[in-house]
Amino acid sequence: MPLFAASRRLLCDFGSSVLQSPPRVFSQVQVLVRDNNVDQALKALKKKLQREGVFREMKLRRHYEKPSERRAREAAEAVRRARKMERKRVEREGF
């Protein structure tokens, strides 16, 4: 059990040390291994990490992103989210 939590912490610490930014506090994720089924536990761990956005953050931190590029990316993401929410609202209300 503690192996999975430690590996997550190592991954996140590695991502922040690459950019030499101050260390951040991460919540500990635990996954229970039932009936020695490690494959199922790994699947649950990956799902939890995916939900928290750890993989996405690691991908973004592989290379330096200029502040102007970051602002442009975040603005584009906000536009995509707004359009998606509008589509869902229209679909719900039936316009």
Image: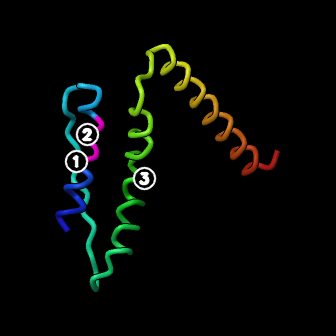
Rate crowding at label 3 as few (under 14), some (14 to 19) or many (20 or more) other CA atoms within 10 Å.
few
Q: Which residues are magenta?
A: 9-15
- Residue shown at the point (38%, 40%) measured from the top left: 58
Q: What predominant SS class does the magenta segment belong to?
A: helix
| Colouring mode (rainbow / by chain / secondary structure / one colour) | rainbow
Give the labeled residue for mark 3: 51
Mark pair 3, 1: CA separation? 18 Å
Closer to the N terminus: mark 3 or mark 2?
Answer: 2
Mark 3 and mark 1 lie on one chain; the one further toward the N terminus is 1
Q: Tag on residue 14? A: 2
Q: Amino acid at mark 3?
A: Arg
On-image quarter of the C terminus: top right
Instruction: Report the residue marked by disc 1.
Output: 10
Q: Nearer the viewer, residue 6 or 79?
A: 6
Q: Are marks 2 and 1 in contact (CB under 8 Å)?
A: yes
Going by the numbered disc 1, the residue's amino acid type is: Leu
Tag 3 near tag 2, CB within 8 Å: no
Residue 91: % across, % down: 75, 49
